[in-house]
């Protein structure tokens, strides 16, 4: 069984301990940039964007013990040259953005900002004429010289009253049959190690990205790495609103801790 982790800034508190070898006995571990559903087999345990989990409904379950949850502040932004609510129709550019940020942005464009997208384009660098740009990570947290920037995790909280569940842990059916507790324990160990060495993690992020230390401390200080029972509704609503018309589904896999109750209810 392999443990996979989506490699973005939001998962740094798990990926830094892997790269720096701060944790021992990690087993078969892979940190994957731009992870897709096709990268994940029924033998794997993986920390993935919630939208990717919708592609694994038939083959995986969600384990609540490890996740990435942003409580009212996050690492995804929407940039516009004027107030976003003054824009009615516009092309949307996803500037080096991963699946989690894409889903969040699409969930908010029309319901919150009133922007009707005339097209969504993934780009490495948005063109000069772009008027609606979604950014994540260092680009989202850096100061904007002109225009308006919205923190989309904050916007999501204002709209729904819920946190932004960016990543969930999925467990393949064969991994589950073989008892995936050891692999899940590895993920929990990484979370604990990242928290214990959070100053080191933040220093490394600052040195590699230039993100302001205070901003970084504020954002990472409002992140959680497990799912509370009520977070299931936040995750469900996110994928329902943010995957419409995309390559992803609109429902999530079952939760591992509910499998017994579902079977007894049939």
Image (cartoon, helix red, strand yellow):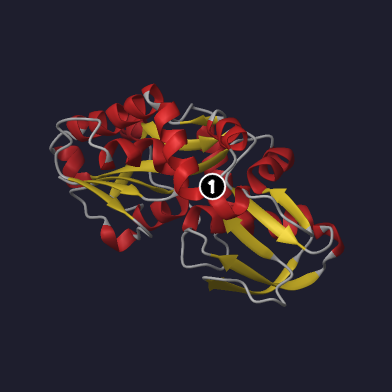
The residue shown at (79%, 64%) is 81
Residue 174 location (% of width, % of height): 17, 46
Residue 47 location (% of width, % of height): 35, 44
Residue that extends furthest to the right in the rendered view of this protein: 86
Q: Is residue 136 above or below residue 154?
A: below
Q: Is residue 261 visible?
A: no
Residue 255 location (% of width, % of height): 38, 36
Q: Is residue 70 above or below residue 2?
A: above
Question: Which quarter of the picture shows residue 216?
Answer: top right
- Residue matched to label 1: 210
Q: Nearer the viewer, residue 71 or 173?
A: 71
Give the side of residue 90 with respect to residue 169, left or right: right
Q: Is residue 105 visible?
A: yes
Give the side of residue 213 with respect to residue 260, left or right: right
In which quadrant will I find the N terminus?
A: top left
Question: Which quarter of the picture shows residue 111?
Answer: bottom right
């Amino acid at each position: 069984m392999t443990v996979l982790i989506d490699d973005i800034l939001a998962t740094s508190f798990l990926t830094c301990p892997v790269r720096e070898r701060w944790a021992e006995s990690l087993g078969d571990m892979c940190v994957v940039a731009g992870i897709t559903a096709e990268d994940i087999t029924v033998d794997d345990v993986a920390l993935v964007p919630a939208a990717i989990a919708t592609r694994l409904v038939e083959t995986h379950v969600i384990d609540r013990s490890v996740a990435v949850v942003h409580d009212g502040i996050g690492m995804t932004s929407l940039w516009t040259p004027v107030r976003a609510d003054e824009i009615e129709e516009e092309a949307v550019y996803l500037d080096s953005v991963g699946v989690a940020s894409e889903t969040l942005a699409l969930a908010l464009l029309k319901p919150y900002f009133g922007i009707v997208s005339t097209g969504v384009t993934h780009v490495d660098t948005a063109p000069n004429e772009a008027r609606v740009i979604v950014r994540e990570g260092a680009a989202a947290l850096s100061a904007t010289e002109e225009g308006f920037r919205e923190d989309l995790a904050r916007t999501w909280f204002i709209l729904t009253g819920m946190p932004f569940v960016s990543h969930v842990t999925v467990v393949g059916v064969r991994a589950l049959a073989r008892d995936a507790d050891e692999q899940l324990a590895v993920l929990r160990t990484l979370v604990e190690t990242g928290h214990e060495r959070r100053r080191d993690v933040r220093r490394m992020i600052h040195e590699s990205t230039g993100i302001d230390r205070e901003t970084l401390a504020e954002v990472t200080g409002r992140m959680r790495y497990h799912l509370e029972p009520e977070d299931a509704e936040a995750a469900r609503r996110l994928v329902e609103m943010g995957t419409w018309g995309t390559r992803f589904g609109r429902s999530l896999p079952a939760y591992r801790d509910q499998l017994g109750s579902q079977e007894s209810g049939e």
